[in-house]
Amino acid sequence: MFVLSAPLFCLRLTCGPEDPVAPTPDECDEPAMARVTTVEIGGADEPFLAWTHGGAAHLTRGPQGGLMIGIVIRLSGAELPSCLAQETSVLNAARDTLVLSRTPLHTYEQPDGSRMTRVHWLVFEAREPAVGDTLSIRAVFASTTTEHTVVVR
C-alpha cells in the first residue's frame, strides 16, 4: 500500500497550470495625474537602487518557467499619486518591444517623501534576452518619459 500511495503523491506535486501566469501586479483602479519632478527606475533589489545607463539588470525565472525582469519605480515631486498611470516597455538593441505593461500601479510613501511602487514583474513571452544583451527600459507617466539602457547579467 505504501508503494502505491507514494507515486500518486509525487504526481500531484509535479502537476501545474498549463499556461504560465505572470505574478499579479499591485494594480490600482483610479490613476491620478501628478506633478512629478524625478522618475527613477530600478530592479527588484532591496534597498532600492536606481539603474544607471549601462548598469546591470538581473532576470529571474519564475515558478512557471517564464523569464522576468522586476522593476520598481520611484517618484519625487509635489502631489505624488497613490495610483500611478504608467506605461513601461522593455526594448532590445534593435528597438523591438519585448514586454509592454500599461497597468496602473499603487505607489507607497517613503520616509524621504518620495513614492515607490512594489516590484512589478514583466514576463518575456515571445523572445527572451540572454546574458550580455543590452535592453532599454522605458517608462512613460503623463508627460514624463524616462529610459535607461541596462545590460543583462
Image: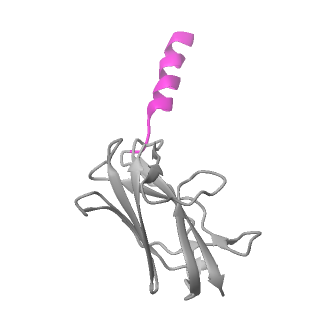
Q: Give the colour scheme of this rendering.
A: one colour
Q: Residue at x 46, y 53 (%)?
A: 55
Residue 50 is left or right of residue 129, and the answer is right
| Furthest residue in direction left, as rendered | 94
Q: Determine if the magenta segment contains residue 13.
A: yes
Horizontal and vertical percent for residue 103? Answer: 47, 72
The N terminus appears in which quarter of the rendering? top right
Q: Residue at x 43, y 52 (%)?
A: 21
Q: From the viewer's perspective, is residue 5 above or below residue 70? A: above
Q: Residue at x 56, y 60 (%)?
A: 50
Q: Residue at x 44, y 60 (%)?
A: 53
Tally of numbered discs: 0
Q: Nearer the viewer, residue 3 or 63?
A: 63
Q: From the viewer's perspective, is residue 104 above or below residue 36? A: above
Residue 94 is left or right of residue 62, and the answer is left
Q: Is residue 1 visible?
A: no
Q: Nearer the viewer, residue 63 or 87?
A: 87
Q: Determine if the magenta segment contains residue 117.
A: no
Q: Is residue 5 visible?
A: yes
Q: From the viewer's perspective, is residue 119 above or below residue 15? A: below
Q: In the figure, residue 116 lies in which quadrant?
A: bottom right
| Furthest residue in direction right, as rendered | 111
Horizontal and vertical percent for residue 4? Answer: 50, 15
What range of the chain is rendered magenta? 1-17
Horizontal and vertical percent for residue 99? Answer: 35, 61
The C terminus appears in which quarter of the rendering? top left
